Each structure stands twice: as structure tokens, then as C-alpha cells.
Amino acid sequence: MPEILAMRLRATPHLRNAGWVAVPILVIACLFFYPLALIARQAFTDDSGAVAIRPFFDVLHSRYFGHALLNTIEIATSATAGCLVLGLALALILTFVPFPGCVLVARLIDTFIALPTFLVTLAFTFIYGSAGILNSLLQQHFGFAQPPVQFLYSAWGVVLAEITVYLPFVLRPLLASLSLMDPGQIEVASTLGARPWQIIRQVILPAAFPALIAGGSLCLLLTINEFGVVLFIGAKGVTTLPLLIYSKAIQESDYQSACVIAVVNIVLSLGLFGLYRAAARRLGA
């Protein structure tokens, strides 16, 4: 998009008038940069309002921050790995093993992008919750005194919900990348005696690698910032960075700590976004 805007600007030099530039810059500054600047200022000031670095590092060295950062990284990387493995398997089947209705299946998976994240979590409580379908069937047929399936209220429940929500963000670029592959490459490899796994590893994966990086980095970016799924599941002892920001700001009114954690979250997000854009440019997006 920025490249397209630059081309149009070169084609229409009369739009270089300063007035046309000032309006969007002012809107962006008011809506995005000014609020971010307020957060950054709050993160680097002490109770008296003076600039101070120590409160920032006090939060970074705190136990609750380290616990939340570790939880965030573990959940985000696990969910992203799950999306990559499941997305690659589905993309290979939908592209190279077509079956009646495969287009409908791909579009149904796409519809998850349009759904609010908490709906998936709500649906999971009906299936895997303490009083859900699965536990009711197991208790009814095997006589368990307590619901035997409790993973939904742990970090694994959060990971499963995030895999379900963010799978399309990996699957879509993979399907687009694999659809551009020359079928002749696979036919030649098969003719030369390569086995299916060798064809996947030596022919398909190199071609799909940029799509895997683009989809994986976008998925990692979204899962690191996920708030609704973690809050809705309410897993005991599972606190991520977005949930810690909410807890500090809303429940404890500790805005300085909340802003410090927000600054770290922003730096992480911008780094992952840079990785995603680099991979997307390689894909030609």
C-alpha cells in the first residue's frame, strides 16, 4: 500500500501541497502517536513526575513481569507452532490431494477470521468445559466422580483456542504460495524416484518457506497480543502481558507499571511486525 501511494504521488505532483500532507499526519498523530507517547512518558517518570529510569527496570526485574513474559512467549510460540504444522498439513491436502468440497472446506476455515475470538472460547466451554459434552459423556459411560477433562482451564486450553482462531492466518498465504507452484517440478521429482516425503522436504517446503515465515510471524504477533481468549478462559495461574496490563491499569490502578509493560509489548509487536513485512515483501504482497 505505501508503494502504491508513492506511485500515485509521483503521477500527481499537484498533491504535494503541504495542506494535503498535514491533515493525514495530524489525524495519525492524534489517534496513534500521541497516545503512544503518553504511555512512553508515563513509563519513564516517577511518582513526582520527573524522568526516571529506575521504575522501568524495577518492573522488568519483578517476578510478576517475568512470569507473564514467560507465559506469553510459551503460549504464543506453542500456538504458532500448532498453526504452522496444522496449516501446512491442511494446505498440502487441499492443494495436492483435491477432493469434492475442498474449496468449501478452505472457505469455511477462512470464516474464522470474521468471528470474534471469544466465540471460539465460548464454544469450547460447551465441548471441553467441566459441564461440557465431552465430560458429560465420559462421566456417564465410565462413572467418573469428577470431570476428567480439565485442560481447557490451563495454558493448553488457551493454546488450543488460539490455534483454532489464528489457523487461517497461516493457511491463506500457504494456499496462495502452493497454488503458484509449477506442477511439473513435482512430476519431475516423482519421475526421478523421489518419495512423497522427499518431494515435500526438497521441492514443496522451499517454495512455501516465505509463506510459512509470513503466516507464522503474523500469527506470533497476534497471539502475543491476544487478550480476549486468555481473559475468557480464565486459566488459573496463566497471566500474559496484555492481561497483566489490564490487571495493573484497571484492577490495581497502577498505571506506571501498566505503561512499562505496554512499552515492552509494543517493542515486541513492532519487531514481529517488521519480520512479517519482510517476509510479505519476499512473497510480493
Image (cartoon, rainbow, N blue to C red):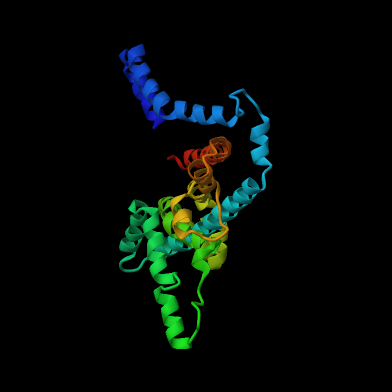
Residue 156, horizontal then vertical, whole percent? 54, 63
- Placement of 248 over or under 234, stated as above or below: above
Q: Which of 123/256 is in front?
A: 256
Rendered residue at 48%/47% (across/down): 222
Q: Quadrant of residue 23?
A: top left
Quadrant (top left/top right/bottom left/bottom right) for the N terminus: top left
| Residue 60 visible somewhere in the drawing | yes
Camera-side residue of 142 and 24: 142
The image shows residue 58 at horizontal and vertical percentages of 67, 38
Residue at (44%, 87%) from the top-left corner?
141
Instruction: Give the x, y percent position of residue 121.
Output: 41, 60
Viewed as shown, does residue 25 lie left or right of 220?
left
Picture coordinates of residue 34 (x, y %)?
45, 26
- Quarter of the picture containing the C terminus is top left
**Is residue 193 among what the camera can see?**
no
Q: Total label count?
A: 0
Q: Residue at x 55, y 27 (%)?
A: 41
Left-right relation of 125 to 266: left
Examine the rendered structure and indicate whether residue 209 appears above or below residue 48.
below
Pick the residue in front: 94 or 110.
110
